[in-house]
Image (cartoon, rainbow, N blue to C red):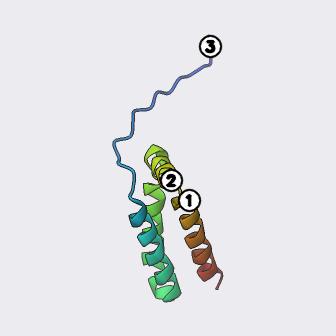
Amino acid sequence: MCGIIAIVRRPSLRTPPAARDVLTGLDASCTALGAGLQSLDDAAHTLEQIDHALSGPPGVRALLEDANLPQEVETRLRDIEGHIAD
């Protein structure tokens, strides 16, 4: 008996997120974190949405289609990390 199992994935039906939506969400999270602990849930919820939007093939397409998006995301994530460290 062979132990090889194949998994075939269906194509994603999600459309790639718009770069401006991703960056706006990251900016909103950064602002919420800067407002203090009372806004922590809002920031976390927005970051979860962005994480989901950038996951899988649609997220990869969004990152590849806009050459500036990966750098912009990284810059904003550094700002977010700074607020968390504070």
- Disc 1 + disc 2, Cβ < 8 Å: yes
The residue tagged with tag 3: helix, strand or loop? loop
The residue tagged with tag 2: helix, strand or loop? helix
Foreground disc of the pair 2, 3: 2
Q: Which mark is residue 2?
A: 3
Q: Residue furthest right?
A: 85
* In front of the other: 66 or 26: 66
Relative to 55, residue 36 above or below: below
Residue that numbered label 1 is attached to: 70
Q: Which mark is residue 29?
A: none
Dividing the picture into quadrants, the one containing residue 71 is bottom right
For label 2, the crowd category at 10 Å Cα-Cα, with few meaning under 14, some 14 to 19 and many 20 or more, is many
Foreground disc of the pair 1, 3: 1
Relative to 70, residue 31 above or below: below
Q: CA distance from mark 1 to mark 3?
A: 42 Å
Please give the count of numbered marks on the rendered protein.
3
Task: Give amino acid for label 2.
Answer: Leu
Q: Identify which residue is drawn at 53% across, 55% down.
A: 67
Residue that numbered label 2 is attached to: 63
Quick check: can you spot residue 45? no
Residue 26 locus on image (x, y percent): 48, 71
For label 3, the crowd category at 10 Å Cα-Cα, with few meaning under 14, some 14 to 19 and many 20 or more, is few
Residue 18 locus on image (x, y percent): 38, 59
Please report whichever mark, 1 or 2, sits nearer to the chain's N-terminal start. Answer: 2
Relative to 44, residue 19 above or below: above
